[in-house]
Each structure stands twice: as structure tokens, then as C-alpha cells.
Amino acid sequence: MKKEFHLKPQAIARRRDTATPLRLFWLSTLSMILILSTSLMAAAQGGAPQSFADLAQRISPSVVNITTTTTVAGRTGPQGIVPEGSPFEDFFREFQDRNGGGEERPRRSSALGSGFVISEDGYVVTNNHVIEGADEIEIEFFEGFTLPATLVGTDPNTDIALLKVEAETPLKFVNFGDSDAARVGDWVVAMGNPLGQGFSVSAGIVSARNRALSGTYDDYIQTDAAINRGNSGGPLFNMNGDVIGVNTAILSPNGGSIGIGFSMASNVVKRVTAQLKEYGETRRGWLGVRIQDVTDDVAEAMGLNGTVGALVTDVPEGPAMESGMKSGDVILSFDGNDVADTRGLVRQVGNTEVGKTVRVLVNREGKTETLRITLGRREESENPVPASQVQPEEDAPAEVDLLGLTLIPLSAEMRDQLQLPETIKGLAVTAVDETSEAFEKGLRSGDVITEAGQSAVQTVAELQDRITEAEEAGRKSLLLLVRRGGDPRFVALSLQSE
């Protein structure tokens, strides 16, 4: 016989009373999860702007296009067509004469770049390589009008130039931000004149900080915001609309943007432009020492506790010698700031006022001493050998194959043919092996290599030295600074085949 169970109303009520708190618990838990998820989604949306339109509209009037005009000297005879002394030289000269080409008239060459206004009275910042060698500089503003510009001053060491225009009304301008406050992953906006297309905006993030590429005073911000030829000299903005960098170069195998661009940090640019505005030139502090980094083996040999500081290898005549600095001293602190390495010391000294007396803490034979040194001016201490006095090794071949490239020192004739200013020195590429990595990465005949391994090169021997140094340092590739038509880019070539 089947049994039936019946619950009394009181029992049902008691079971409902027991289940209600549990149901409420789960409902409240689900509500909290939903609220938390909504908050996280809102936070994520707040970190990624839905649009850059308002920012672009606000800062665009301060960004300018720059057009430069340069007079290129004409050539006579068949230069560049046949080698000098060739049996065909007379034939080509007669052919040119018959066609009115025996003597070319000077011609005008134009180039494009970018810049930005930093004051209402018309000061404009751009790259030095944008205006280098220009006879005329014209600034095109976002509103559509143009003004001629005069050159106030340049700093080739940081590739910065300051221009000035005279306008009838105050100009719209932007302020420099604190580049040290920029963090990897922060949103940034690049503006400029890429490939001559006019005012253009691209966005990305800060990919890396404190990049040192080719100069003593480098402090580059790396970004994946699209930067192409023509963007040089344009601003890199943070989300507040402040300039935190000046777009200068790209790392590219083909000359176009692949998401690795470099902008000179605004904290460097601010100091440079302030000096250019006041003096028309830079005035950097000078200590007067030759230094090298402290390596592990050097630290062990000298009995040092670590590899921090800068080892003094030579003390020529100058401020440091006058104050008692000696070869073998390890500089630990400069003007109250710790010295991490040689690069850090050079930047600290360069950013210090000329004529200032600073305290320099050194480790000398295991003991610390404090020296008081009055800084000189670096620009007055530099006395480079004129290019005309730089003689190649007599036994060095005129043309050499290295890294898949056929190279020859850049001559005055080649410089004219390539329409390069006299300040450009280096190795000209006359041919590229089409099976080489160099060809794959976009190097072509007519390119000029001005630096290798972050050091200037003017002879094949110097390039070979840079290759040897890189191999001895255990590096697998060599970073080259290549200029094409004056525009710089970095290309890394493998050393495995060398």
C-alpha cells in the first residue's frame, strides 16, 4: 500500500522561512558581482578614450607644417654619369653640350616637415634636420595662412631647432609637459605633416622610456603612434594636451612606420629651447674628464662594492684638473645627485649651469673625497678636427663591402649629387647585395650611414672598429643611423655573417 505524505500549512511556512535567508544571500551576492563588473568595465572605458576628437580640435591650431627651400649648386660636365677618366667622358660631355646640359644652373629643392608653436609671439620648435641648410623657411598654420620664419638657433646634439615668425595677432600655442611623468602604457597623440599629406593625427601609447639612440644627451620616448617621413619636428602630446616629446626618428626596415617611433623628451627640449631663445645657442656645463662605465671586472679589481659611478680614465686640462680630479677616480655623486653610469653623469653635467661650482664625490683608492669644481662650457671645449683635415688610411681601399653594403666615404661631389648639406658626413652606400639583410631592411644605393653603434663614422675603418666593438661586447647586431635625403632612421643589421 502506497503511503502518502502531507505537509501541514505550518510546516510549509517553516520551510519557506528557512529558504528565504539563503535566497536573499545569493541575490545580494549576485548583485555585488554585477556592481563590481560594471565598475571594472567603467574603469576600463575610462582608461581607453572613446575619441580623441576634442583633444585634437583643441591642440591642432598650434601644430604647423614647415616647408624649406634650398638652392642646390649646379654641376658641370658629365659628373655622376661616367667615372672620371673614362673613355666615354668626352662623348658624354659633347652630348651634354649639344643639349644645353654642359653647365647646369643652380636649382631649388624643397623639403617638408612639422613643428609646433610654443608662445603667442611666434616661437616655433622643430627638428634641426628639418631646416638644416635651408635658404627659406615657410610656416603653414592650421587655419590656412602662411608666414616666413627666421632661424633663432639650433642644437644638432638633440636635433632641435627654434624658429620665429612675426604675426599680426597672437598665435595659438601649446605648453611643454613633464616628460618624466609619462609612464609606459600612457596614451599619446602624434601630430604633423606625414609624407606631405598636411595636418594629420595618430594615437598610440608610450612603448618605452629613456631610450638612448645616437647622441650624448639623448632621452627619447618610444611610441607606437604612427610617425612617418614629414612628421619630424612635430609634437607628441599627452592626454592633457601638453607636449611631452618632439617626433624625431623611426626604426624601420622600409622607411615607413612599423610602430617604433622616437620623440625627444620634452624636459630636454625645454632646456634647449630656453637657451636658444636667450642666447641663440646652447650653453652646457663641462666637467673636463674622460670616463667609462664601471664593469664587474673593473669593480672587482678596484675593490669597489658595485658597478655604479663613472670611472675617470683621463683628466685633460680643464675644470676637473684645476680642482684636483685624477685618473682612476670613480665619480659617485655630482651636485648632490647619485651617478649611476657615464650616460647619467654626462646628462647631469650638461644640464647644469655654466660657471656653477658643484660638489663632486669621488672614490679614490678606496676612500671618498669631495671636490669643488667650477664648471666650464662644453661648446667652448669642443674643437673637432675639420673634415678637410681628416685623412683616410693610405692603405685603406676606396670602396669596401661590409654587412651586404658597398661603402665609400662621402665626398663633396657625392654630397652635391645627393643634395646633402655640408654638415652631413659619413659613408655613402653605392650598392646593396639584393640577397642581404640590408637590402631586405630597405637600404639602397644613395643612403648615407652617419653613425654605427651610436658613434659617428666617416671612414670604413671606423665602421670596422664599431663592428669589432659590438662583437667583443657580445652583441648580435649593430645599430646604424641611415640618412636618405637628410631624413634619419635607425636600422639594425645582424653581425652573424661578418
Image (spheres, grey):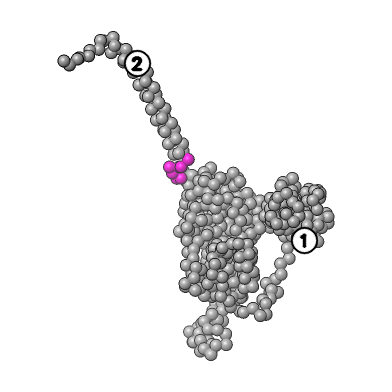
- Tag 1: amino acid: Asp
Rounded to the nearest whole Å, what is the CA distance between mark 1 and mark 2? 88 Å
Task: Please tell me the numbered disc located at residue 18.
Answer: 2
Residue 397, given in percent of the width and then of the height, sits at: 62, 79
Residue under label 1: 314
Closer-to-camera residue (361/238): 361
Question: Looking at the image, is mark 1 or mark 2 earlier in the sequence?
Answer: 2
Closer-to-camera residue (158/135): 158
- Tag 2: amino acid: Thr
Residue 57, given in percent of the width and then of the height, sits at: 47, 46
Displayed quadrant of residue 414: bottom right
Q: Give left or right: position of 463 versus 350.
A: left
Relative to 415, is 470 above or below?
Answer: above
Closer-to-camera residue (493/272): 493
Relative to 64, is 100 above or below?
Answer: below
Magenta extent? 47-53
- The prevailing secondary structure element of the residues shown in magenta is loop
